[in-house]
Image (cartoon, rainbow, N blue to C red):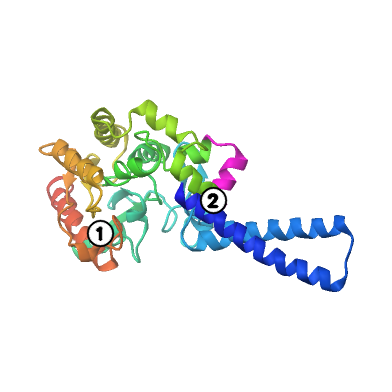
Amino acid sequence: MKNVYLLILISVIFIGVINYYLYLFITKKGISNKFKNLLVYFLSSLLIFVFLDFYVFKFFGHGFPSSISEEKFERSPSPYDSFSGKPFYKDHNSLGFRGIEFKNYDNHTLQIAFFGGSTGYNGEPPIIDLIEKKLNKKNIKNKTFNFSSVSSNHNQHVHRLVKYSDLNFDIIIFYGGFNETLQTYLYDPRPGYPFNFWIRNELNKLKYLLLKYSAIYAEYEKQTGNVSNIKKIKKDLNFKSDEWLGDLINNYYLTLNKAKKISENAINSNFCKKTKFFGFYQPILINKSDDFAKKIIKKTKNFFINKEILIDISEILDENDFTDSVHITQSSKNIIAEEIFNYIYEYTLKKCS
């Protein structure tokens, strides 16, 4: 609660100083209407408080991030999969995904669907576009479909896969790991739930707006969890227990299995004889001071050892390749693309020629 008290104290000091000079000004002008004076002091205090709380404190990193771009354009509400990109924003197509319009091509074209979070969405170009270029260099006619969106997880991607199952895919790639585990640890703690589901869908509008824009209100929530009821949710889940961690990893596993079954049994191929599913576990840079985050990664990697459902490529980058705990430099995307390309190229030569 120290942050909350500190921000309130700063607000009171600023309001006191400004109103003191306002009092001197009013006295000098000889304005004697007490009601008007009180109204001026009240409005002055309110404006100063709002300015400090909504702008100054937020600027210095207090409260929750409130990126209008991400919320309106990169995490735009979407049926079935909760959210995706906003259609026709920047290079988004009519479905809200990066790239040209999605459609089926002739049956000599290898069609690849790529599902990821921001690590699949970001990039100039993104990872899947780099893979498309590598296949072109091998004279494999192909078209890639980037279904990635910021903060989305594989539970959402399963719904998204079904949602767009009218398209043909020869290869379906699920690229992730962070949003399926650590994002759940850091935000909404219920395994498989979309990013901040409890804030987006379970708060009344006033609380949602205050948490989004008020630094003091959000700092109080961070310290207590009393505003959003997240404290009770974590208690009911036995958050950070071995049981919770087991459920988290098991949800990841079951989601990949669902994606594989749907991909290889319900999705029509376009060029190959049948559709092939690939799951890749992405590189993650662990905060060395967060022991539980390290535990999540270790348990996850150990669980998937010798399980064909997930290919672990998490060790192919160095610390310098990261811009934060999961996002990587543009040059590093080439390394990821090359690794994934090697798997699908080998499969294509064996099964699709």
Q: Is residue 347 above or below residue 339?
A: above
Task: Please report the residue visible at 51 percent of the width from the left and 48 percent of the height from the top.
Answer: 218
Which residue matches tag 1? Answer: 131
Please indicate, yes or no, whether residue 268 appears anywhere in the rendered image: yes
Which residue matches tag 2? Answer: 216
* Element at label 2: helix
What are the residue bounds of the magenta stretch?
A: 202-215
- Relative placement, left or right, of 53 versus 152 is right
Task: Please report the residue visible at 15 percent of the width from the left and 57 percent of the height from the top.
Answer: 316
* Element at label 1: helix
* Amino acid of disc 2: Ile
Q: Nearer the viewer, residue 162 or 221?
A: 221
Q: Which label sits in the foreground, 2 or 1?
A: 2
Q: Quadrant of residue 222?
A: top left
Q: Is residue 10 magenta?
A: no
* Amino acid of disc 1: Ile
Task: Please report the residue visible at 57 percent of the width from the left and 61 percent of the height from the top.
Answer: 55
Q: Is residue 207 magenta?
A: yes
Q: Position of residue 305 (x, y in %)?
A: 11, 39
Q: Tag 1 or tag 2, which sits nearer the N-term?
A: 1
Task: Please report the residue visible at 15 percent of the width from the left and 45 percent of the height from the top.
Answer: 351
Residue 149's mark?
none
Labelled pair 2, 1 in contact (Cβ < 8 Å): no
Principal secondary structure, stretch drawn in magenta: helix
- Relative placement, left or right, of 19 versus 207 is right
Q: Is residue 329 above or below residue 117?
A: below
